[in-house]
Amino acid sequence: MKRPSFGLRAKVTAAVVLVTTTATAVMAFTASKVQEDDAVDSFVYSAETTFGSLFEQSWRGLEAVMDNRSTLTEFAERMSDLTPEWTLFTKRPDGSADLVNFGSTDLWHRAQPVPVRVGDRQGIVASVQDRVLVRTSKTMDLLTAITVDPETGKRLLVVSGNFVGYWLVEFYDLTPLDIDLAAQRQKLVLIALGVAALGVVAALFAAWNIQRPVRRVASAARDLGDGAFDVRVPVKGRDELAELAKSFNTMADRVGASIEKLRAKDRQQQRFVADVAHDLRTPLASMVATVGTLDSATPEVRTRATELLGTQTRRLARLVEDLMEISRFDAGSADFRPEPVDLPALVEDAVGAAAPETPVEVTSTGDTTVVADPRRLHTIVVNLLVNATRYGRTPITVTLTGGADTVWIRVADSGPGIPEDLLPILFDRFVRGDQARQATEGSGLGLAIARENALIHGGEMTAHNDHGAVFTVRLPRESPA
Protein backbone atom coordinates (compact mmCIF):
# COMPACT_ATOMS: atom_id res chain seq x y z
CA MET A 1 0.00 0.00 0.00
CA LYS A 2 1.40 3.35 -1.01
CA ARG A 3 1.77 5.73 1.88
CA PRO A 4 0.23 9.19 1.43
CA SER A 5 2.63 11.98 0.51
CA PHE A 6 2.49 15.27 2.36
CA GLY A 7 3.95 18.59 1.31
CA LEU A 8 6.47 20.66 3.24
CA ARG A 9 3.78 23.04 4.47
CA ALA A 10 1.66 20.19 5.86
CA LYS A 11 4.71 18.60 7.51
CA VAL A 12 5.85 21.85 9.14
CA THR A 13 2.31 22.64 10.28
CA ALA A 14 1.84 19.16 11.72
CA ALA A 15 5.20 19.32 13.48
CA VAL A 16 4.52 22.71 15.07
CA VAL A 17 0.97 21.73 16.05
CA LEU A 18 2.21 18.44 17.52
CA VAL A 19 4.93 20.15 19.53
CA THR A 20 2.62 22.94 20.67
CA THR A 21 -0.23 20.59 21.59
CA THR A 22 2.07 18.14 23.35
CA ALA A 23 3.82 20.87 25.30
CA THR A 24 0.50 22.48 26.24
CA ALA A 25 -1.01 19.15 27.30
CA VAL A 26 2.03 18.27 29.39
CA MET A 27 2.05 21.70 31.01
CA ALA A 28 -1.70 21.58 31.66
CA PHE A 29 -1.47 18.08 33.14
CA THR A 30 1.50 19.06 35.28
CA ALA A 31 -0.20 22.24 36.45
CA SER A 32 -3.37 20.27 37.25
CA LYS A 33 -1.44 17.70 39.27
CA VAL A 34 0.53 20.36 41.12
CA GLN A 35 -2.63 22.32 41.83
CA GLU A 36 -4.45 19.17 42.97
CA ASP A 37 -1.60 18.15 45.25
CA ASP A 38 -1.38 21.65 46.70
CA ALA A 39 -5.13 21.82 47.23
CA VAL A 40 -5.24 18.39 48.90
CA ASP A 41 -2.25 19.26 51.07
CA SER A 42 -3.90 22.51 52.06
CA PHE A 43 -7.16 20.72 52.84
CA VAL A 44 -5.36 18.05 54.85
CA TYR A 45 -3.49 20.72 56.76
CA SER A 46 -6.72 22.55 57.59
CA ALA A 47 -8.40 19.30 58.62
CA GLU A 48 -5.45 18.36 60.80
CA THR A 49 -5.53 21.80 62.39
CA THR A 50 -9.25 21.47 63.15
CA PHE A 51 -8.86 17.92 64.37
CA GLY A 52 -5.78 18.78 66.40
CA SER A 53 -7.65 21.41 68.32
CA LEU A 54 -10.44 18.89 69.03
CA PHE A 55 -7.99 16.16 69.95
CA GLU A 56 -6.14 18.32 72.42
CA GLN A 57 -9.40 19.09 74.24
CA SER A 58 -10.77 15.56 74.19
CA TRP A 59 -7.90 13.25 75.09
CA ARG A 60 -8.07 14.20 78.81
CA GLY A 61 -11.75 13.23 78.79
CA LEU A 62 -10.87 9.82 77.42
CA GLU A 63 -8.14 9.42 80.07
CA ALA A 64 -10.82 10.12 82.71
CA VAL A 65 -12.91 7.32 81.17
CA MET A 66 -9.94 4.99 81.31
CA ASP A 67 -9.32 5.95 84.95
CA ASN A 68 -13.01 5.28 85.77
CA ARG A 69 -13.53 8.90 86.70
CA SER A 70 -16.22 9.26 83.97
CA THR A 71 -18.25 7.15 81.55
CA LEU A 72 -18.32 6.92 77.75
CA THR A 73 -21.71 8.63 77.83
CA GLU A 74 -20.21 11.62 79.57
CA PHE A 75 -17.34 11.55 77.08
CA ALA A 76 -19.83 11.50 74.19
CA GLU A 77 -21.71 14.49 75.58
CA ARG A 78 -18.41 16.37 75.88
CA MET A 79 -17.45 15.51 72.28
CA SER A 80 -20.83 16.63 70.91
CA ASP A 81 -20.06 20.10 72.22
CA LEU A 82 -16.71 20.11 70.45
CA THR A 83 -17.41 18.66 66.98
CA PRO A 84 -20.41 17.63 64.84
CA GLU A 85 -18.97 14.22 63.93
CA TRP A 86 -16.59 11.93 65.79
CA THR A 87 -15.88 8.25 66.08
CA LEU A 88 -13.94 6.31 68.65
CA PHE A 89 -12.15 3.11 67.58
CA THR A 90 -10.10 0.47 69.25
CA LYS A 91 -8.64 -2.81 68.00
CA ARG A 92 -9.85 -6.33 68.61
CA PRO A 93 -7.36 -9.00 69.65
CA ASP A 94 -7.10 -10.09 65.99
CA GLY A 95 -6.02 -6.54 65.02
CA SER A 96 -9.21 -5.53 63.19
CA ALA A 97 -10.93 -2.19 63.78
CA ASP A 98 -13.60 -2.11 66.51
CA LEU A 99 -16.00 0.86 66.67
CA VAL A 100 -16.46 1.89 70.29
CA ASN A 101 -18.65 4.98 70.04
CA PHE A 102 -19.52 7.85 67.72
CA GLY A 103 -21.48 11.06 67.66
CA SER A 104 -23.38 13.03 64.99
CA THR A 105 -24.84 16.51 65.23
CA ASP A 106 -26.94 18.06 62.48
CA LEU A 107 -26.63 21.70 63.46
CA TRP A 108 -23.13 23.06 63.29
CA HIS A 109 -22.06 26.46 62.13
CA ARG A 110 -18.29 26.62 62.06
CA ALA A 111 -15.87 27.31 59.25
CA GLN A 112 -14.76 24.61 56.84
CA PRO A 113 -13.49 22.00 56.83
CA VAL A 114 -16.17 20.40 59.00
CA PRO A 115 -16.31 16.64 59.73
CA VAL A 116 -19.14 14.89 57.90
CA ARG A 117 -21.42 12.02 58.72
CA VAL A 118 -20.81 8.72 57.00
CA GLY A 119 -22.79 5.50 56.98
CA ASP A 120 -20.43 2.55 57.28
CA ARG A 121 -17.84 3.98 59.68
CA GLN A 122 -16.55 0.52 60.47
CA GLY A 123 -16.03 -0.44 56.82
CA ILE A 124 -14.45 2.84 55.84
CA VAL A 125 -11.90 2.75 58.67
CA ALA A 126 -11.24 -0.94 58.03
CA SER A 127 -10.17 -0.08 54.47
CA VAL A 128 -7.46 2.27 55.73
CA GLN A 129 -6.78 0.96 59.22
CA ASP A 130 -3.15 0.14 58.37
CA ARG A 131 -2.64 3.88 57.93
CA VAL A 132 -4.92 5.51 60.50
CA LEU A 133 -5.10 2.94 63.33
CA VAL A 134 -1.37 2.93 63.97
CA ARG A 135 0.29 3.67 67.27
CA THR A 136 2.48 6.79 67.00
CA SER A 137 5.40 7.77 69.17
CA LYS A 138 3.62 10.88 70.39
CA THR A 139 0.00 11.23 71.37
CA MET A 140 -0.41 14.44 69.34
CA ASP A 141 0.89 12.87 66.11
CA LEU A 142 -2.04 12.73 63.67
CA LEU A 143 -2.55 10.21 60.85
CA THR A 144 -4.43 10.77 57.58
CA ALA A 145 -5.61 8.67 54.66
CA ILE A 146 -7.85 9.28 51.64
CA THR A 147 -10.42 6.66 50.71
CA VAL A 148 -13.80 6.34 49.02
CA ASP A 149 -17.16 5.99 50.74
CA PRO A 150 -18.60 2.76 49.26
CA GLU A 151 -22.18 4.01 49.79
CA THR A 152 -21.88 7.43 48.09
CA GLY A 153 -18.73 7.06 46.00
CA LYS A 154 -17.36 10.30 47.44
CA ARG A 155 -13.75 10.72 48.40
CA LEU A 156 -13.17 11.03 52.13
CA LEU A 157 -10.26 12.25 54.19
CA VAL A 158 -9.85 10.13 57.32
CA VAL A 159 -7.97 11.81 60.20
CA SER A 160 -7.09 9.98 63.43
CA GLY A 161 -5.28 10.61 66.67
CA ASN A 162 -4.29 7.83 69.05
CA PHE A 163 -4.86 7.44 72.80
CA VAL A 164 -3.70 4.51 74.82
CA GLY A 165 -5.64 1.70 73.12
CA TYR A 166 -8.10 4.08 71.38
CA TRP A 167 -8.18 6.20 68.21
CA LEU A 168 -10.35 9.26 67.73
CA VAL A 169 -11.38 9.43 64.06
CA GLU A 170 -13.12 12.06 61.93
CA PHE A 171 -14.18 12.02 58.30
CA TYR A 172 -13.94 15.00 55.93
CA ASP A 173 -15.73 15.21 52.57
CA LEU A 174 -13.40 16.02 49.64
CA THR A 175 -16.29 16.58 47.22
CA PRO A 176 -16.17 20.42 47.34
CA LEU A 177 -12.44 20.23 46.74
CA ASP A 178 -12.94 17.80 43.83
CA ILE A 179 -15.55 20.12 42.33
CA ASP A 180 -13.15 23.04 42.51
CA LEU A 181 -10.37 20.95 41.02
CA ALA A 182 -12.65 19.77 38.22
CA ALA A 183 -13.52 23.39 37.44
CA GLN A 184 -9.81 24.23 37.40
CA ARG A 185 -9.11 21.31 35.12
CA GLN A 186 -11.84 22.47 32.78
CA LYS A 187 -10.28 25.93 32.67
CA LEU A 188 -6.89 24.37 31.94
CA VAL A 189 -8.42 22.33 29.13
CA LEU A 190 -9.97 25.46 27.62
CA ILE A 191 -6.65 27.26 27.95
CA ALA A 192 -4.87 24.31 26.33
CA LEU A 193 -7.35 24.30 23.45
CA GLY A 194 -6.83 28.05 23.01
CA VAL A 195 -3.07 27.61 23.01
CA ALA A 196 -3.41 24.73 20.53
CA ALA A 197 -5.53 26.93 18.26
CA LEU A 198 -2.93 29.67 18.45
CA GLY A 199 -0.33 26.99 17.74
CA VAL A 200 -2.18 26.03 14.55
CA VAL A 201 -2.23 29.66 13.43
CA ALA A 202 1.45 30.05 14.31
CA ALA A 203 2.22 26.78 12.53
CA LEU A 204 0.48 27.90 9.36
CA PHE A 205 2.31 31.21 9.49
CA ALA A 206 5.67 29.51 10.12
CA ALA A 207 5.03 26.99 7.36
CA TRP A 208 4.16 29.79 4.97
CA ASN A 209 7.34 31.68 5.89
CA ILE A 210 9.41 28.53 5.42
CA GLN A 211 7.66 27.44 2.24
CA ARG A 212 7.89 30.82 0.52
CA PRO A 213 11.71 30.89 0.14
CA VAL A 214 11.69 27.19 -0.70
CA ARG A 215 9.17 27.87 -3.45
CA ARG A 216 11.33 30.73 -4.69
CA VAL A 217 14.29 28.37 -4.91
CA ALA A 218 12.15 25.72 -6.63
CA SER A 219 10.86 28.28 -9.15
CA ALA A 220 14.37 29.52 -9.76
CA ALA A 221 15.54 25.93 -10.24
CA ARG A 222 12.82 25.41 -12.86
CA ASP A 223 13.84 28.62 -14.63
CA LEU A 224 17.46 27.50 -14.49
CA GLY A 225 16.47 24.18 -16.00
CA ASP A 226 14.64 26.04 -18.77
CA GLY A 227 17.82 27.89 -19.70
CA ALA A 228 17.58 31.12 -17.64
CA PHE A 229 21.13 30.88 -16.34
CA ASP A 230 21.05 34.44 -14.97
CA VAL A 231 18.29 33.63 -12.46
CA ARG A 232 19.20 34.25 -8.83
CA VAL A 233 17.36 33.98 -5.48
CA PRO A 234 17.37 36.92 -3.03
CA VAL A 235 19.22 36.10 0.21
CA LYS A 236 17.48 37.28 3.38
CA GLY A 237 18.68 36.62 6.92
CA ARG A 238 21.30 34.21 8.16
CA ASP A 239 19.32 31.03 8.75
CA GLU A 240 19.35 27.72 6.90
CA LEU A 241 16.96 29.06 4.24
CA ALA A 242 19.39 31.89 3.56
CA GLU A 243 22.14 29.28 3.26
CA LEU A 244 19.92 27.39 0.81
CA ALA A 245 19.49 30.54 -1.27
CA LYS A 246 23.25 31.18 -1.18
CA SER A 247 23.96 27.60 -2.19
CA PHE A 248 21.49 27.86 -5.08
CA ASN A 249 23.06 31.11 -6.27
CA THR A 250 26.52 29.55 -6.06
CA MET A 251 25.26 26.56 -8.02
CA ALA A 252 23.63 28.85 -10.59
CA ASP A 253 26.89 30.79 -10.96
CA ARG A 254 28.80 27.57 -11.51
CA VAL A 255 26.20 26.17 -13.88
CA GLY A 256 26.18 29.43 -15.83
CA ALA A 257 29.97 29.45 -15.97
CA SER A 258 30.00 25.80 -17.01
CA ILE A 259 27.40 26.40 -19.70
CA GLU A 260 29.37 29.37 -20.97
CA LYS A 261 32.49 27.22 -21.04
CA LEU A 262 30.59 24.50 -22.87
CA ARG A 263 29.33 27.06 -25.37
CA ALA A 264 32.85 28.38 -25.80
CA LYS A 265 34.08 24.81 -26.20
CA ASP A 266 31.33 24.21 -28.72
CA ARG A 267 32.36 27.28 -30.68
CA GLN A 268 35.96 26.18 -30.36
CA GLN A 269 35.01 22.70 -31.54
CA GLN A 270 33.24 24.14 -34.55
CA ARG A 271 36.27 26.26 -35.26
CA PHE A 272 38.47 23.23 -34.67
CA VAL A 273 36.55 21.20 -37.24
CA ALA A 274 36.66 24.07 -39.72
CA ASP A 275 40.38 24.56 -39.20
CA VAL A 276 41.10 20.84 -39.51
CA ALA A 277 39.10 20.72 -42.71
CA HIS A 278 40.94 23.79 -44.02
CA ASP A 279 44.37 22.48 -43.07
CA LEU A 280 43.64 19.08 -44.56
CA ARG A 281 42.05 20.49 -47.69
CA THR A 282 44.97 22.72 -48.63
CA PRO A 283 47.69 20.02 -48.87
CA LEU A 284 45.23 17.50 -50.28
CA ALA A 285 44.18 19.91 -53.01
CA SER A 286 47.81 20.58 -53.81
CA MET A 287 48.54 16.85 -53.89
CA VAL A 288 45.57 16.14 -56.17
CA ALA A 289 46.68 18.89 -58.53
CA THR A 290 50.25 17.59 -58.52
CA VAL A 291 49.35 13.96 -59.18
CA GLY A 292 48.18 14.86 -62.66
CA THR A 293 51.68 16.05 -63.60
CA LEU A 294 53.51 12.88 -62.56
CA ASP A 295 53.10 11.34 -66.01
CA SER A 296 54.50 14.41 -67.75
CA ALA A 297 57.13 13.74 -70.41
CA THR A 298 59.32 16.48 -69.01
CA PRO A 299 61.72 15.25 -66.31
CA GLU A 300 61.84 18.67 -64.64
CA VAL A 301 58.04 18.71 -64.19
CA ARG A 302 58.03 15.20 -62.74
CA THR A 303 60.83 16.13 -60.31
CA ARG A 304 59.00 19.26 -59.20
CA ALA A 305 55.76 17.28 -58.72
CA THR A 306 57.56 14.70 -56.64
CA GLU A 307 59.05 17.41 -54.41
CA LEU A 308 55.63 19.01 -53.91
CA LEU A 309 54.06 15.69 -53.06
CA GLY A 310 56.78 15.02 -50.51
CA THR A 311 56.36 18.45 -48.91
CA GLN A 312 52.58 18.15 -48.65
CA THR A 313 52.81 14.58 -47.40
CA ARG A 314 55.17 15.63 -44.60
CA ARG A 315 52.83 18.52 -43.74
CA LEU A 316 49.90 16.12 -43.52
CA ALA A 317 51.95 13.75 -41.37
CA ARG A 318 52.85 16.56 -38.95
CA LEU A 319 49.22 17.66 -38.75
CA VAL A 320 48.01 14.11 -38.13
CA GLU A 321 50.67 13.59 -35.47
CA ASP A 322 49.67 16.84 -33.73
CA LEU A 323 46.01 15.81 -33.82
CA MET A 324 46.86 12.41 -32.37
CA GLU A 325 48.87 14.07 -29.60
CA ILE A 326 45.96 16.37 -28.76
CA SER A 327 43.59 13.39 -28.70
CA ARG A 328 45.91 11.55 -26.30
CA PHE A 329 45.85 14.55 -23.94
CA ASP A 330 42.05 14.65 -24.14
CA ALA A 331 41.81 10.93 -23.40
CA GLY A 332 44.28 11.17 -20.49
CA SER A 333 46.50 8.53 -22.09
CA ALA A 334 49.54 10.65 -22.90
CA ASP A 335 52.78 8.77 -22.22
CA PHE A 336 54.81 10.39 -19.41
CA ARG A 337 58.29 9.17 -18.45
CA PRO A 338 60.07 11.47 -16.00
CA GLU A 339 63.82 11.34 -15.44
CA PRO A 340 66.55 13.80 -14.42
CA VAL A 341 67.02 16.40 -17.17
CA ASP A 342 69.77 19.02 -17.61
CA LEU A 343 67.79 21.93 -19.05
CA PRO A 344 70.69 23.89 -20.60
CA ALA A 345 71.75 20.88 -22.67
CA LEU A 346 68.13 20.16 -23.66
CA VAL A 347 67.59 23.79 -24.73
CA GLU A 348 70.78 23.81 -26.83
CA ASP A 349 69.56 20.69 -28.62
CA ALA A 350 66.11 22.26 -29.18
CA VAL A 351 67.73 25.40 -30.61
CA GLY A 352 69.64 23.26 -33.08
CA ALA A 353 66.42 21.50 -34.11
CA ALA A 354 64.05 24.50 -34.27
CA ALA A 355 66.29 27.44 -35.25
CA PRO A 356 69.61 26.18 -36.54
CA GLU A 357 70.28 29.35 -38.55
CA THR A 358 68.79 31.85 -36.06
CA PRO A 359 70.94 33.36 -33.30
CA VAL A 360 69.40 32.41 -29.94
CA GLU A 361 70.94 33.54 -26.65
CA VAL A 362 70.62 30.97 -23.85
CA THR A 363 71.36 31.97 -20.22
CA SER A 364 71.04 29.88 -17.06
CA THR A 365 70.88 30.94 -13.41
CA GLY A 366 70.83 28.60 -10.41
CA ASP A 367 70.22 24.88 -10.39
CA THR A 368 68.20 24.11 -13.53
CA THR A 369 68.11 20.33 -13.21
CA VAL A 370 64.57 18.92 -13.14
CA VAL A 371 62.92 15.53 -13.04
CA ALA A 372 60.70 15.56 -16.14
CA ASP A 373 59.94 13.85 -19.41
CA PRO A 374 62.78 15.02 -21.70
CA ARG A 375 60.81 14.35 -24.89
CA ARG A 376 57.95 16.53 -23.78
CA LEU A 377 60.22 19.31 -22.48
CA HIS A 378 62.01 19.23 -25.83
CA THR A 379 58.61 19.61 -27.57
CA ILE A 380 57.77 22.63 -25.40
CA VAL A 381 61.02 24.45 -26.14
CA VAL A 382 60.96 23.58 -29.85
CA ASN A 383 57.39 24.84 -30.26
CA LEU A 384 58.20 28.12 -28.46
CA LEU A 385 61.33 28.65 -30.54
CA VAL A 386 59.46 27.88 -33.78
CA ASN A 387 56.78 30.36 -32.73
CA ALA A 388 59.44 32.99 -31.95
CA THR A 389 61.24 32.55 -35.28
CA ARG A 390 58.02 32.56 -37.31
CA TYR A 391 56.17 35.45 -35.73
CA GLY A 392 58.89 37.41 -33.94
CA ARG A 393 62.25 38.93 -34.72
CA THR A 394 65.73 38.57 -33.38
CA PRO A 395 67.27 38.79 -30.90
CA ILE A 396 65.62 35.73 -29.35
CA THR A 397 66.55 34.80 -25.79
CA VAL A 398 65.96 31.70 -23.68
CA THR A 399 66.41 32.29 -19.94
CA LEU A 400 66.58 29.41 -17.46
CA THR A 401 66.11 30.22 -13.76
CA GLY A 402 66.29 27.67 -10.95
CA GLY A 403 64.55 28.22 -7.63
CA ALA A 404 64.17 26.12 -4.49
CA ASP A 405 61.32 23.97 -5.81
CA THR A 406 60.63 25.52 -9.21
CA VAL A 407 62.40 26.11 -12.50
CA TRP A 408 61.37 28.74 -15.06
CA ILE A 409 61.92 28.69 -18.81
CA ARG A 410 61.49 32.10 -20.47
CA VAL A 411 61.48 32.47 -24.26
CA ALA A 412 61.35 36.05 -25.56
CA ASP A 413 61.62 37.61 -29.03
CA SER A 414 61.84 41.19 -30.25
CA GLY A 415 58.94 41.10 -32.67
CA PRO A 416 55.62 43.00 -32.74
CA GLY A 417 54.25 40.92 -29.86
CA ILE A 418 50.98 39.07 -29.50
CA PRO A 419 47.80 40.83 -30.65
CA GLU A 420 45.70 41.78 -27.63
CA ASP A 421 42.65 39.98 -28.99
CA LEU A 422 44.63 36.74 -29.16
CA LEU A 423 46.10 36.80 -25.65
CA PRO A 424 43.01 35.29 -23.89
CA ILE A 425 42.78 32.42 -26.42
CA LEU A 426 46.40 32.06 -27.41
CA PHE A 427 46.74 28.51 -26.10
CA ASP A 428 43.49 27.28 -27.63
CA ARG A 429 43.67 24.87 -30.51
CA PHE A 430 44.03 26.17 -34.07
CA VAL A 431 44.40 29.73 -32.82
CA ARG A 432 46.45 31.74 -35.32
CA GLY A 433 46.39 35.27 -36.59
CA ASP A 434 45.12 35.75 -40.11
CA GLN A 435 48.53 36.84 -41.32
CA ALA A 436 50.10 33.80 -39.72
CA ARG A 437 47.66 31.53 -41.56
CA GLN A 438 48.62 33.06 -44.87
CA ALA A 439 52.37 33.25 -44.30
CA THR A 440 53.19 29.95 -42.58
CA GLU A 441 52.45 26.27 -42.67
CA GLY A 442 51.78 25.98 -38.95
CA SER A 443 48.79 23.95 -37.81
CA GLY A 444 47.84 26.20 -34.90
CA LEU A 445 48.34 23.30 -32.47
CA GLY A 446 51.91 24.00 -31.39
CA LEU A 447 51.17 26.28 -28.44
CA ALA A 448 48.21 24.13 -27.34
CA ILE A 449 50.47 21.05 -27.31
CA ALA A 450 53.21 22.97 -25.48
CA ARG A 451 50.78 24.09 -22.80
CA GLU A 452 49.38 20.55 -22.36
CA ASN A 453 52.94 19.28 -21.94
CA ALA A 454 53.56 21.89 -19.25
CA LEU A 455 50.35 20.93 -17.44
CA ILE A 456 51.17 17.23 -17.48
CA HIS A 457 54.37 18.11 -15.60
CA GLY A 458 52.31 19.91 -12.93
CA GLY A 459 53.43 23.28 -14.25
CA GLU A 460 51.89 26.07 -16.29
CA MET A 461 52.55 28.29 -19.30
CA THR A 462 51.76 31.98 -19.62
CA ALA A 463 52.32 34.64 -22.27
CA HIS A 464 52.57 38.43 -22.28
CA ASN A 465 54.12 41.28 -24.26
CA ASP A 466 57.31 43.01 -23.18
CA HIS A 467 59.02 44.59 -26.23
CA GLY A 468 57.96 41.43 -28.01
CA ALA A 469 56.26 38.16 -27.15
CA VAL A 470 57.36 36.53 -23.91
CA PHE A 471 56.42 32.95 -23.01
CA THR A 472 57.12 31.65 -19.50
CA VAL A 473 56.98 28.00 -18.48
CA ARG A 474 56.94 27.16 -14.78
CA LEU A 475 57.96 23.61 -13.88
CA PRO A 476 58.18 21.94 -10.48
CA ARG A 477 61.61 20.52 -9.80
CA GLU A 478 60.01 17.13 -9.09
CA SER A 479 57.29 16.36 -11.62
CA PRO A 480 54.42 14.05 -10.65
CA ALA A 481 55.02 10.41 -11.45
Image (cartoon, helix red, strand yellow):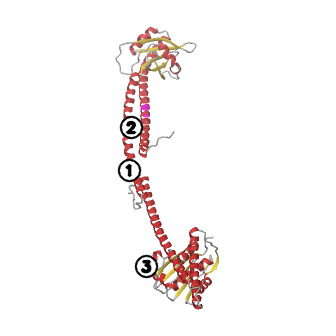
Q: Nearer the viewer, mark 2 or mark 3?
A: 3
**How many C-alpha atoms fall within 10 Å of the one at disc 3: few (<14), some, or many (≥20)?**
few
* Residue 33 is a magenta residue: yes
> Is 310 in front, or is 187?
310
Please state which amino acid type lies under the numbered disc 3.
Glu
Residue wearing tag 2: 196
Please state which amino acid type lies under the numbered disc 1.
Arg
Residue wearing tag 1: 212
- Is residue 210 shown above or below 378? above
Please state which amino acid type lies under the numbered disc 2.
Ala
| Whether residue 412 is visible | no
| Image quarter of the C terminus | bottom right
Q: Position of residue 114 (x, y in %)?
A: 39, 19
Residue wearing tag 3: 420
Q: Which mark is residue 345?
A: none
Q: Secondary structure at mark 2?
A: helix
Q: Do tag 1 and tag 2 residues touch (Cβ < 8 Å)?
A: no
Q: Tell me the distance, in whole angstroms, between the alpha carbons under discs 1 and 2.
A: 24 Å
Write the start and end of the magenta stretch as one range.
30-34
Looking at the image, residue 328 sits to the left or right of residue 431; the answer is: right
**How many C-alpha atoms fall within 10 Å of the one at disc 2: few (<14), some, or many (≥20)?**
many
- Is residue 425 shown above or below 189? below
Q: Which of the two discs, 1 and 2, labels the residue nearer the N terminus?
A: 2
Q: Do tag 2 and tag 3 residues touch (Cβ < 8 Å)?
A: no
| Whether residue 48 is visible | yes
- Is residue 224 shown above or below 178? below
> Is 358 in front, or is 373?
358
Q: Nearer the viewer, mark 3 or mark 1?
A: 3
